[in-house]
Amino acid sequence: MRARELGVRIGLLDPGPLDAITDVPGVLVGHTTLIRGDGPLVVGVGPVRTGVTVVVPHEDDVWTEPLFAGCHRLNGNGELTGLEWVRESGLLGGVIAITNTHSVGTVRDALVGHAARAHSNDSVFWSLPVVGETYDGALNDINGFHVQPHHVDEAIASARPGPVPEGNVGGGTGMVCHEFKGGLGTASRRGTDADGGWTVGALVQANYGSRELLRIDGVPVGQQIPTSEVPSAWDAEELAGTAGTDAAPTMSASSRVGPGGGSIIVVLATDAPLLPHQCERLAQRASLGLGRMGSIASHGSGDIILAFATGNRGLSRTAAVRDGRETVDLRMVVDKAISPLFQAAVESVEAAVVNALLAGETMTGRDGVIAHGLDHARLLDVMARYGRGPRAPAG
């Protein structure tokens, strides 16, 4: 069940046909989901609740045909590799991957290997992949390093256009958001024809936030469904860490993530012809969507955003030599016409987080820690009491 299917309309703009990042033509998404084992944590064995998600920016060779891109750090207690080159060059040149905190290195190296194998005849090929993370150690054997290179290859092989699985899938499998079960979420918003008709799509790996701060369409849902009613996975994780087992050492209080941490990775895509600095401006607006959900970008949260634009395809293929100079013709959205794209970014990010919460199903992880899904009927009851009852889906 997704927000618009439930009758919860986020924002004023209409979504694309799929209400997903794949509404941006050419964008593909793939997942590898790893779920196995139950009971006490045994490091290296399980239980396993993790995975990897990939966003493929277009259907041609993404490793050699870059796109304009920009990024933004709302809070930096996290990782999204490769951003120094994005900032320096304004270009994104490859598949984007998202996984758990301790698997970033494995996934990054796997992407390099995947790209190198695809360009084995190019002796000077190189890659600086973009790989993000959020922490799934409340539910997953995060120190067991269960994500392996072949899982990355499988996620890329599974990448498709069309509807995007959400919730307990891919990199979002073991994630917790606002102390409910979180995970992967996606949404899109399309400007009017008068505003250019461009689409902005968002994909989030949502693993942040305190319950009491959660707001949906402006309604203080977290205060109305407190942890005394629906327990927090972080409280259960703390108890599990305090108890410990012979097989798994306890975590110190300083090493636990807790509701004030967790992190979120946001990927924005648009078919608008944006230049790199405009992509950066778009990425900044994702922060407003998170703020509308109740994020305060706390000290312990890694909130990092990447935005790319497909509206200037062919940056490496269409270069022409004119008067002895190698150039490429570009388009750009004029500044006075960019605000509708900002609105689309804000609304699509907000809606993507809501979709992640609605898709996240109750999950029992290591040591019996439970992350409870957000009950749809209970949510609608709260929304109705604030005058936000079900409305006809947009689009």
Image: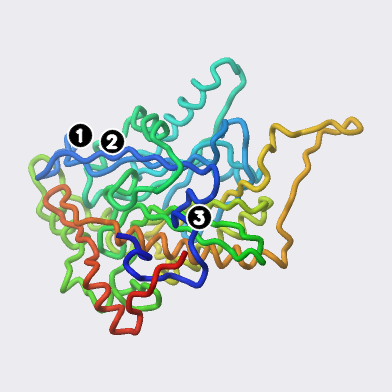
Closer-to-camera residue (145/12): 12
Q: Are the two marked residues, 1 and 2, in contact with CB atoms closer than 8 angstroms?
A: yes
Give the answer, above or below, for where 338 lies relative to 245: below
Q: Which residue is mark 1?
A: 44
According to the picture, the residue beneath numbered tag 3 turns out to be 201
Could you say where residue 272 lies in the image, as x and y percent from the top left? 64, 54
Residue at image x 62%, y 60%? 197
> Label 1 sits on what residue type?
Gly
Reading the image, the residue beneath label 2 is 145
351 up-or-down from 62: above or below: below
* Mark 1: secondary structure: loop
Q: Give the CA distance from mark 3 to mark 1.
A: 37 Å
Q: Earlier in the sequence, mark 1 or mark 2?
A: 1
What residue sits 91% from the left and 33% below the top? Answer: 323
Left or right: where 335 falls relative to 359: right
* Residue 1 placement, left or right of 152: left
Query: In x, y percent, where is residue 220?
Result: 33, 78
Identity, as a three-letter code, of the amino acid under mark 3:
Gly
* Image-based side of 331 in relation to 138, left or right: right
Point out the frontmost of discs 3 and 1.
Answer: 3
In the image, what residue occupies the spot 82% across and 33% down? 326
Q: Could you give the CA–CA distance between mark 3 and mark 2, rounded to whole angstroms?
A: 31 Å
Which type of secondary structure does the marked residue at label 3 adopt?
Answer: strand
